[in-house]
Amino acid sequence: MITVVAALIKKDNKYLLAKRKTGDESVLGKWEFPGGKVEKGEEEKHAIEREIKEEFDLKIKAKKFITNNVYEYPSKVVDLRLYECEYISGNFRLHDHSEYTFASKEDILKFDLCPADIQLAKCIDLN
């Protein structure tokens, strides 16, 4: 099982989603809460801060764990762990994504989300 962290970044009552341009065929071109794999020995909060810096050149602060979803893709099983994060600084520069947007919680499920992200999106109301 691969542990993956995802960032829930809120701005003006909307949440950051990014469209994948790299990775497994089952997620290419789909939208997700951005993040990435936790490296061996790395704390999850540090991993999400590092991944967002690498993928978007943004500095964020991981605040709290929200929920997780264990999902079995054709080639792997991931434990996707969503963290509420605060934007600190930086301007968006895309590296692993083709585009990004901020969507209201009512609109998130209208996006073609990565399968593991769908359950996370349904939990946003619980915060």
Image (tube, rainbow, N blue to C red):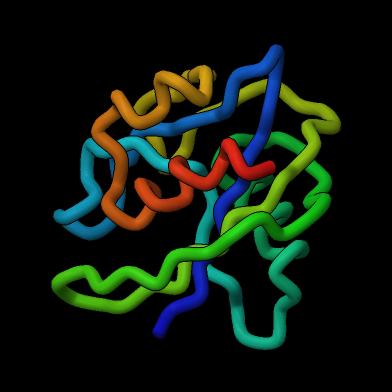
Is 119 located above or below residue 12 in the figure? below
Is 90 located above or below residue 115 in the figure? above
Q: Quadrant of residue 51?
A: bottom right
Name the residue at 70% across, 87% down.
41
Q: Looking at the picture, how far across and down is residue 21, in whole percent?
A: 29, 40
- Image quarter where the C terminus lies is top right
In this image, 101 relative to 11: left or right? left
Q: Quadrant of residue 12?
A: top right
Q: Looking at the picture, how far across and down is residue 85, in whole percent?
A: 74, 43
User: Which residue is outermost to the top?
Assistant: 12
In this image, 120 relative to 7: left or right? left
Q: Looking at the picture, how far across and down is residue 16, in whole percent?
A: 55, 29
Name the residue at 57% across, 40% down.
124
Name the residue at 35% across, 29% down.
98
Name the residue at 14% across, 72% down.
74
Q: Quadrant of residue 47?
A: bottom right
- Image quarter where the N terminus lies is bottom left
Q: Looking at the picture, how far across and down is residue 113, in whole percent?
A: 30, 39
Number of numbered tags placed on the structure image: 0
Pick the residue in front: 126 or 16.
126
In this image, 37 relative to 53: left or right? left
